[in-house]
Image: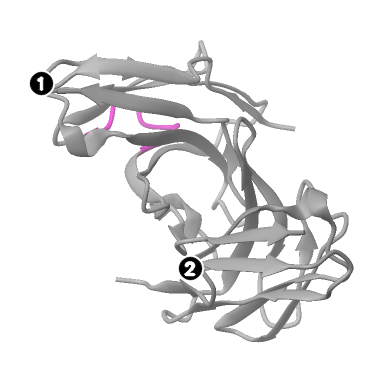
């Protein structure tokens, strides 16, 4: 079974600084997708960024980027120019094939933004 | 945008009651999912469905059942609620086939308390 590990239960960063959230995963499959989801206090899960395993290039969405190391099975999220609205729980998730069998989530990292 | 609606934001039920959590999506998605979210444990998959009247067990199906009589509606049923089922429940949906690649769309969650 696939597992996703987020080793940082909580992280804190000053506003406008950069922070990196860690995620590692374990799988024997070659075709899969990785995601970062954000869950603010409103509880709505919001897709931040996704990465297709067959793509070498790291995904980027505005201030959010990933460092995808396939051999190391590592998928970290970098948030640049942190803003107060970035404060949330962040979940790393793994999906194989078309993702139709559900995603496997990590336990989450609580990100605190210090003004 | 796809909308996934969970009928109740908060719910308080008594031990032994039969509980129904309802989820409706408005974009003709084939695949729907129920997750349970607990602090420090992340999201865990309870059940999912590929199509009407189809259901598959996820990682933690014990104590739960589901019903999918119509494509847009996926119900989670607690046959006899227990206090250890106090949790946040999240519903999600995707287009069938490779829809999971684009990420899941989540409802805003139902926080269930069993007393």
Decide which of B15, B87 is in the foreground and name it: B15
In this view, which residue lies farthest toward the top? A72
Q: Chain of mark 2?
A: B
Is B46 one of the magenta-colored residues? Answer: no
Applied colour scheme:
one colour
Above or below: residue B28 compared with residue A6: below
Decide which of B39, A105 is in the foreground and name it: B39
At numbered mark 1, what does the secondary structure look like: helix, strand or loop? loop
Q: Which residues are magenta?
A: A50-60
Q: Is residue A57 visible?
A: no
Q: Residue at x 10, y 21 (%)?
A: A16
Crowding near the residue tagged with mark 2, few <14, some 14–19, many ≥20 C-alpha atoms within 10 Å = many
Residue B93 falls left or right of residue B75: left
Q: Chain of mark 1?
A: A
Decide which of B111, B37 is in the foreground and name it: B111
In this view, which residue lies farthest toward the bottom? B70
At numbered mark 2, what does the secondary structure look like: helix, strand or loop? loop
Above or below: residue B68 compared with residue A38: below
Q: Residue at x 35, y 50 (%)?
A: A46
Residue B50 falls left or right of residue B94: right
Task: In the rendered structure, find residue A16 and report the number of the disc placed on it.
Answer: 1
Query: x, y (%) of residue B14?
Result: 80, 67
Residue A4 falls left or right of residue A76: right
Task: In the rendered structure, find residue B95 and report the number of the disc placed on it.
Answer: 2
Q: In this figure, what is the number of numbered marks?
A: 2
Task: In the rendered structure, find residue B66 and report the number of the disc placed on it.
Answer: none
């Amino acid at each position: 079974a696939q597992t996703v590990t987020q080793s940082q239960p909580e992280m804190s960063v000053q506003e406008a600084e950069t922070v990196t959230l860690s995620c590692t995963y374990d799988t024997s499959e070659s075709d899969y997708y990785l995601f970062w989801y954000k869950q603010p206090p409103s509880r709505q899960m919001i897709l931040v960024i996704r990465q297709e395993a067959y793509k070498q290039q790291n995904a980027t969405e505005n201030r959010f980027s990933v460092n995808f190391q396939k051999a190391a099975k590592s998928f970290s999220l970098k948030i640049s120019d942190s803003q107060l609205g970035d404060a949330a729980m962040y979940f790393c998730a793994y999906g194989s094939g078309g993702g139709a069998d559900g995603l496997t989530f990590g336990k989450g990292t609580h990100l605190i933004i210090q003004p | 945008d796809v909308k996934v609606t969970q009928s109740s934001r908060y719910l308080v039920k008594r031990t032994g009651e039969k509980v129904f959590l309802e989820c409706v999506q408005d974009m003709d998605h084939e695949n729907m999912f129920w997750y349970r979210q607990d602090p420090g444990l992340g999201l865990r998959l309870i059940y999912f469905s590929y199509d009407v009247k189809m259901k598959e067990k996820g990682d933690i199906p014990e104590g739960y059942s589901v019903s999918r009589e119509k494509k847009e509606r996926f119900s989670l049923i607690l046959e006899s609620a227990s206090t250890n089922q106090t949790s946040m429940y999240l519903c999600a949906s995707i287009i069938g086939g490779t829809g999971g690649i684009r990420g899941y769309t989540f409802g805003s969650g139902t926080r269930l308390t069993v007393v």
